[in-house]
Amino acid sequence: MRVNKPLRIAILDPGGMGKTTLALHFLHTGSVINAYPSQLFISCEGTNSLDELLLDIAEQVRIPSEQRKEYLQDQILGALKKIPTIICLDNLETLWEPAALRTITEGFLNHLSSIQTLGLIVTIRGNQRPNEVTWPQPLLKPLPTLKIESSLKIFEKIVGIQPDENVQGLLIEVEGIPLAITLISNLIRDEAESPEALWSRWKKEKTKSKDDRGCKRAASPSIFPTRWLL
């Protein structure tokens, strides 16, 4: 695979679709490693400000702690220009979605994208990309959900048995979200719960969610928390 420079990629999904896994796999391909000898992976999950993000990046580019008190962004941009580098900002929605942080976050992305020797990957939960970056055409579409046939194959590979009607019902309910499929498969493989019991509990929790909140559908919080799918 030939890497076109400067590399600018936004990986989008609704949550639980594997955007982080895809980004890491891409970073570890031979052509990317050859094109970008320096690779940075920065998780933005739990990051509440641009200053926190800058400190995380400063740690990875090895800016001494005593030099981080002033002009840190300029120091980081200078460090990123020294050798061809690719940086992945994972779960960037944490910093980009809040209205109070969007402008300053997009401004920083603009500075990053101005470095021609820098590859930039962002993963975002949702279907929108940040402004201030020229994303190459054609734009990558958000990651699609899996078809039921693929969901069943994943279950078979993890558990090692044919899915029964209870498993099929569960996999239809999670609508092709890979993380949810994996979690259900692991619960059954590890005998934490039988397919029959899990399917029964799912239906009860779903009915309860409808009654309590009037939702058309809701994943059972007692089967796996919603935050696991983010």
Image (tube, rainbow, N blue to C red):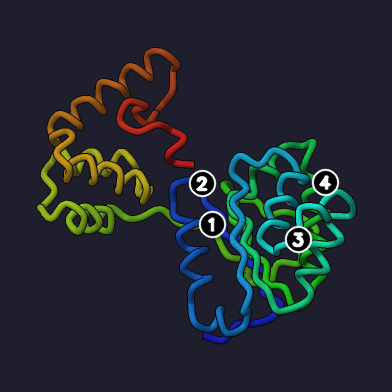
Residue where numbered disc 2 is placed: 14
156 left or right, relative to 90:
left
Q: Earlier in the sequence, mark 3 or mark 1?
A: 3
196 left or right, relative to 46:
left
Residue 103's disc number? 4
Task: Please report the residue visible at 83 percent of the width from the left and 55 percent of the height from the top.
Answer: 67
Coordinates of residue 185 in the picture (x, y in percent): 23, 46
Marks 4/3: CA distance?
25 Å
Q: Quadrant of residue 107?
A: bottom right
Is mark 1 in CB contact (under 8 Å) with mark 2?
A: yes
Residue where numbered disc 1 is placed: 142
Q: Earlier in the sequence, mark 1 or mark 2?
A: 2
Task: Please report the residue visible at 32 percent of the width from the left and 24 percent of the height from the top.
Answer: 206
> Few, some or many C-alpha atoms within 10 Å of disc 3 (few <14, some 14-19, many ≥20)?
some
Instruction: Using the image as rendered, state which of residue 3 and residue 175 is in the foreground.
Output: 3
Instruction: Using the image as rendered, state which of residue 5 and residue 85 is in the foreground.
Output: 85
